[in-house]
Amino acid sequence: MTGFAATGPHVLRRMNAAAVLGALREAPGGTGRVADLMGATGLSRPAVTRALNLLAEAAIVDFTEDTAARVGRPAVRARFRAERGHVAGIDVGPHKVLVMLADLAGTVRAQRRVSVPRGLDGGSLADLLRTALIEAAGAAGVVPEELWAVGVGTPGVVDRERGEVVLAPSIPGWAGTSLLAELRAWLGCPVHIDNDVNLAVVAERWRGETSENLLFVQWGERIGSGIVIDGKPYRGAHSASGELGFLDLVTPIDAEAPHVADGLGSFERLVGAGAILRLAVERCGEELRRALTAGGDLAPLFAAAEAGDAAASGVVETIAARFARGLAAQLLVLDPGLVVVGGGVSRAGEPLFEAVRGHLRRMLLVPVELRVSALREEGVALGAVRMALDGAERRLSASLLS
């Protein structure tokens, strides 16, 4: 009891400060009066006042007079100093690295996207990541060594506790790299890592959909899914749940699965962005083939389908049927109620997704709602920002009374 009496008040003040900070950060404009914060946290006026003073000492909060008050002495309004620090969210993929710099409110202040040259190994990719981070920080007017925390999203199986990429078939030499240790040594701040699709789900629940039961599908060259059950992310016993891209719908049961050097799973070779491009080049007319091969972008295919091109519409219908069949395998097991699709192929628009919905209706026992993510290709980096913000908040909370 003596030990609790000695430490209890300190712990309580820190918890109150964290609650007030959370309420202030979520308030419109990041500002609020004491009365507003009392209502949001359920704390008493003295408790809120002490918490605000503690946050002010840490330079996280400042105060202004509420000039809108018409009668009596102006009320004091507290402001969350989001500019006090910055975090970075990084999306690492086999084809691109996307870095976002955000303030402590999660507002993105700068971003840098760089393409990954074909055949780049894990060590060279780490160098590219560091360069992109330096450039993004410079655009935001931030010194990288002043970041409060960094989040990294990567394809493959990730051991979050050890901070290691265990398996990454799409990036040769990426698994087992000492990237996180090197970043921590360089930046001097917490660096966290997670599977890219899991982070896309984090972003979706932060800035997009809030359904308690959700299946998120990241559809690009690679295909993966993130699962939310009763409001909680499901990762599986080995953090390997949701690897939809490796679902095999085509290999006969008595045949040996073919070995491929590109690390793509069977479903990815069937409906991934590369597979869609190859099918379109094979089936479409010469003019559309030239447009597709010139830049490797699928946009001309979907635009042609929407305009009524029969060959393009046929490709879209084929891909929709294939994708729906693989997706149905997950939906029949999970029954999530809501499916959100992000990633590069999510830009295809209604011709593709209305066809997917049509096929799903014939394959499922109960209806499912399918939406396209508003975050599109930025979901992973935004989820990494959210993970970094959580790390920064823990660091701040621990330092309030140190």
Image (cartoon, rainbow, N blue to C red):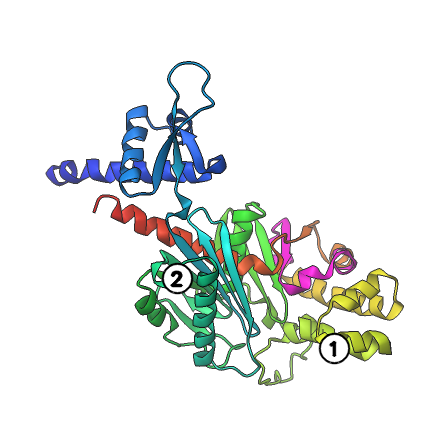
Inspect this view and state whether residue 236 appears.
no
- Seen as rendered, the residue at the extreme left is 2
Considering the image in quadrants, where does the N terminus appear? top left
Q: Amino acid at mark 2?
A: His
For mark 2, does the 10 Å Cα neighbourhood hold few (<14), some (14 to 19), or many (20 or more) residues? Answer: many
The answer to if 356 sits in the magenta stretch is yes
Over which residues does the magenta segment extend?
331-357
Left or right: residue 174 versus residue 46 is right
Residue 261 lies, with reference to residue 24, above or below; the image says: below
Q: Nearer the viewer, residue 354 or 90?
A: 90
Q: Position of residue 10 (x, y in %)?
A: 21, 39
Label 1, secondary structure: give it.
Answer: helix
Q: Position of residue 210 (x, y in %)?
A: 56, 45
Residue 31 lies, with reference to residue 91, above or below; the image says: above
Q: Amino acid at mark 1?
A: Ala
The residue where tag 2 is placed is 192
Q: Main secondary structure of the magenta part?
A: helix
Q: Position of residue 163 (x, y in %)?
A: 37, 67
Left or right: residue 19 versus residue 271 is left
Inspect this view and state whether residue 257 appears.
yes
The answer to if 119 sits in the magenta stretch is no
User: Which of marks 2 and 1 precedes in the sequence?
Assistant: 2
Point out the frontmost of discs 1 and 2.
1
Q: Position of residue 314 (x, y in %)?
A: 84, 68
Label 2, secondary structure: give it.
Answer: strand
Q: In the drawing, what numbered circle is on residue 294?
A: 1
